[in-house]
Image: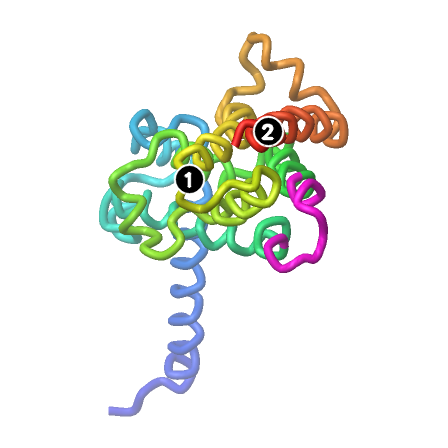
Amino acid sequence: MRRDTAAVAATPHTGRTARADGAATRAAILNAAGRVFAECGYAQATSKAICARARINMAAVNYHFGSRDGLYLAVLKATHQHMLGLDFISGLARRAMPAEEKLTLFIRGLVDAILDAGSWQTRVWARELLAPTSLLGLATPAQALPGIDVLTGIAMAITGRRARDPALAACVVSALAPCLILLVADPRAGMPLQALYGRSAAALTRQLHGFALAGLRAAARHA
């Protein structure tokens, strides 16, 4: 039987189109889910809200990701790749500059994410730092929380504390906590924090950096 030449020629194109459509749908679901998880957290984010944001049904989620947990794992992996790709994290450890200046750059990177409503990856990262889920280790078996090693190195240089000093972890948490709170808080809510979201990136960086640096210097004096 003679095959239709036009049909044969169209087959590869149709396959490519289907694959492209599938990849676009998967990316749209991932982006919508990332935003919902960033806004609500893993426990409170619902499949219904994700499907509504992505304008798809749950069958599409299951097809591309297997389950809601599978979708969250994909969100965590995308978050990990995004965080490791950020210049303010990946380049700081290698840069030759005083630790205080590195701290400024680290906090400025977080401030940019705080003021950027579209940066869902950094907000998901912040939520995992504040309330780690059981899926975190499955998504990022190596360096599960990118950036913490960099900030720990900065804290060690400023405080003079050693890596295994229990007080060092408290120093890192104290320096990072205000940024994390601003990352996960809703800037639209009527609350005292709301005024901070209206500040310029430079002004907010100076405020958060001054707070963090004062705490680290105090820890150095009481080492």
Seen in the image, is 191 located left or right of residue 44? right
Disc 2 target residue: 221
For the residue pair 210 and 201, the one nearer the viewer reads as 210
Quarter-wise, where is residue 128 in the image?
Answer: top left
Residue situated in front as seen by the camera: 17 or 217: 217
Instruction: Give the mark nearer the N terminus: 1 vs 2.
Output: 1
Amino acid on which disc 1 is placed: Asp
Residue 39 among magenta residues: no
On the image, the x and y values in percent for residue 143 come to 40, 53
Q: Nearer the viewer, residue 166 or 115?
A: 166
Asked if residue 22 is positioned above or below residue 72 in the image, the reply reads below
Q: Residue at x 30, y 53 (%)?
A: 64
Q: Point out residue 204 in the picture as x, y percentages from the top left corner.
A: 70, 26
Label drawn at residue 165: 1
Q: Is residue 81 left or right of residue 87?
A: left
Badge 2 element: helix
- Dot 2 crowding, Cα within 10 Å, few <14, some 14–19, many 20+: few
On whether residue 98 falls in the magenta region, the answer is yes
On screen, residue 202 versus residue 32, left or right, reads right
Tell me if I can see residue 156 in this picture: yes
* Residue type, mark 2 in image: Arg
Outermost bottom residue? 2
Q: Position of residue 84 (x, y in %)?
A: 51, 54
In front of the other: 45 or 90:
90
Q: Secondary structure at mark 1?
A: loop
Q: Which residues are magenta?
A: 92-103
Let me know if residue 60 appears in the view. Answer: no
Colour pattern of the rendering:
rainbow
Residue at 60% x, 26% y is 218
